[in-house]
């Protein structure tokens, strides 16, 4: 049975002992598990990766059927699940596991997935898909945090935090917690405080560098490279950030090539493209066609491998790649 994320408040977890939560948004997964199962819970919690379960199925079944030290109730969480779990879960349907809740987390399951289809079709099973947070959802995360902690932030600061979190509520909550600690010694927070405190801000030049590189703003790219002393890890991060942005452009390009307007694609794209990015994304799409993006992705993979093999020369390699090879 499918229960959508927005319907979860009506969900009674006593009606099912097996719950599949799948999708790329780890923050929502954790929020769902905390709110539905772990709030005020004091029993045993057993955590497994899928391979640990499959490598020791007898031990897993034994732990499943053994009574908890804290009473009869028990929660089991299985992470990184795939269709390899299908047979085991199907077998569990015939077992009495009334006092044990089994939560299964998966990053992605296709429509044809046997595990997903099992949870969607069986009435005694629960399946919840989760998707990337949009701006509205991230704003709600901020509002709830500020309300609980009796804090206030300007809308400008909220927008910066949302933009830099890149649709990840875990990142957002981490940065909000830091701002909360800072507020204990400072009554009013400004943008400089956010920039000094935020880990996201430390990597902001990486995002800016990536965007300007893909927009072929060669002067800006050179300035950013010269102003920052990037480590080898930073160089890998730069490559992967550009790579992710390339893949996003490729998805958008495919939609546009199917006669969908660029504004429509950008407005409805998932995960959302934040308002400050929209103009530069449009500029990038005018520069890169499908073939050139595919070629760039190949080049990025090559240069990442080269950096890993020549760590001491990583800065020179990234500088050469970004200023000479692909800004012609």
Image (cartoon, rainbow, N blue to C red):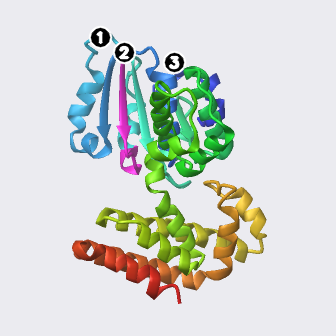
Foreground pick, 89 / 106: 106
* SS type, badge 3: helix
Q: Which residue is mark 3?
A: 14
Toward which corner of the image does residue 1 lie, by quadrant? top right
Using the numbered discs, state the Cα–Cα distance from disc 1 to disc 2 in whole angstroms.
8 Å
Residue 70: which numbered mark, if any? 1
Using the numbered discs, state the Cα–Cα distance from disc 2 to disc 3 in whole angstroms.
12 Å
Q: Nearer the viewer, mark 3 or mark 1?
A: 1
Foreground pick, 303 / 298: 303
Q: Which residue is mark 2?
A: 73
Q: Residues within 10 Å of mark 2 (few under 14, many from 20)?
A: some
1 and 2 marks in contact (CB < 8 Å):
yes
Measuring from the top left, give residue 178's x and y in whole percent.
45, 34
Q: Is residue 18 left or right of residue 255?
A: left
Measuring from the top left, give residue 111's x and y in whole percent.
56, 54
Image height of 160 relative to 205, above or below: above
Image height of 230 relative to 189, above or below: below
Count every numbered label the image shows and give the total: 3
Q: Is residue 118 visible?
A: no
Q: Is residue 136 left or right of residue 61?
A: right
Which stretch appears magenta? 73-86
């Amino acid at each position: 049975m499918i229960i959508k994320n927005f319907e979860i408040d009506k969900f009674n977890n006593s009606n099912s002992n097996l719950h599949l939560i799948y999708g790329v948004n780890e923050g929502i997964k954790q929020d769902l598990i905390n709110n539905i199962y772990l709030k005020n819970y004091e029993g045993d919690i057993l955590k497994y990766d899928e391979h640990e379960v499959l490598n020791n199925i007898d031990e897993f079944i034994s732990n499943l059927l053994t009574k908890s030290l804290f009473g009869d109730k028990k929660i089991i969480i299985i992470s990184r699940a795939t269709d390899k779990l299908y047979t085991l879960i199907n077998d569990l349907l015939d077992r009495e596991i009334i006092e044990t809740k089994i939560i299964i987390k998966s990053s992605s399951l296709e429509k044809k997935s046997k595990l997903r289809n099992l949870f969607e079709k069986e009435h005694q099973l629960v399946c919840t898909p989760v998707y990337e947070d949009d701006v509205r959802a991230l704003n709600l995360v901020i509002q709830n945090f500020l309300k609980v902690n009796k804090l206030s932030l300007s809308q400008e600061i909220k927008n910066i935090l949302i933009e830099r979190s890149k649709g990840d509520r875990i990142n957002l909550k981490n940065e909000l917690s830091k701002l909360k600690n800072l507020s204990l010694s400072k009554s009013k927070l400004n943008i400089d405080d956010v920039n000094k405190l935020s880990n996201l801000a430390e990597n902001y030049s990486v995002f800016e560098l990536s965007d300007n590189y893909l927009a072929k703003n060669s002067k800006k790219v050179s300035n950013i490279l010269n102003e920052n002393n990037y480590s080898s890890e930073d160089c890998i991060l730069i490559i992967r950030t550009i790579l992710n942005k390339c893949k996003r452009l490729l998805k958008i390009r495919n939609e546009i090539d199917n006669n969908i307007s660029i504004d429509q694609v950008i407005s409805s794209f998932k995960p959302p493209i934040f308002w400050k990015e929209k103009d530069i994304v449009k500029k990038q799409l005018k520069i890169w066609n499908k073939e050139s993006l595919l070629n760039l992705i190949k080049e990025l993979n090559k240069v990442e491998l080269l950096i890993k093999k020549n760590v001491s020369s990583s800065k020179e390699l990234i500088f050469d790649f970004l200023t000479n090879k692909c800004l012609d």
